Image (tube, rainbow, N blue to C red):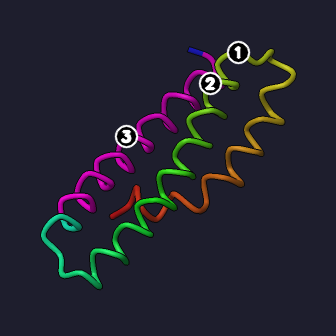
Amino acid sequence: MNTRDAYKQKTEAELELVKANLDVLRAKAKSATANMKISYLEEIDKIEQNYGTMQSKLDELGEASEGAWEHLKKDIENSWDSLRAYAKK
């Protein structure tokens, strides 16, 4: 396994944690009061948008040449910052 594949695998695993935490937030939103439900839904929407962006970038990474993947890695790291907190929850 080369460095690019290892990086992609690590990032995909972290995205799976974000996805699991999204499921928890959705469950909380279902049982929340009206005001809290709005807050949860706004947070879920933001996370889903960032998740979709990250998934697209990972797809690009899988198709990138060895020379181009370093540039994509920087883009992924910049985008990942907004999602990283949800992977750690």
Q: Residue furthest front?
A: 34
Q: Which residue appears at 63% of the width and 17% of the height? A: 2
The numbered mark, 3 or 2, whose residue comes first in the sequence reads: 3
Q: Is 25 one of the magenta-colored residues?
A: yes
Q: Which residue appears at 48% of the width and 57% of the height? A: 47
Q: Mark number for residue 63?
A: 1
Picture coordinates of residue 49 (x, y %)?
Answer: 55, 51
Please tell me in which quadrant of the rendered image residue 89 appears: bottom left
> Can you say whether 53 is above or below 21 in the image?
above
The numbered mark, 1 or 3, whose residue comes first in the sequence reads: 3
Quadrant location, the N terminus? top right
> Can you say whether 74 is above or below 63 in the image?
below
Comparing 47 with 18, the one in front is 47
Considering the numbered disc 3 on the image, is that residue within a helix, a strand or a loop?
helix
Q: Mark number for residue 16?
A: 3
Magenta-tinted stretch: 2-27
Return the residue at label 2: 59
Side of 61 relative to 28 (left or right): right
10 Å crowding of disc 2: few (<14), some (14-19), many (20+): few
Picture coordinates of residue 64 (x, y %)?
Answer: 76, 18
Comparing 26 with 55, the one in front is 26
- Say if mark 2 contacts mark 1, CB within 8 Å: yes
Q: Residue furthest right?
A: 67
Amino acid type at circle 2 is Asp
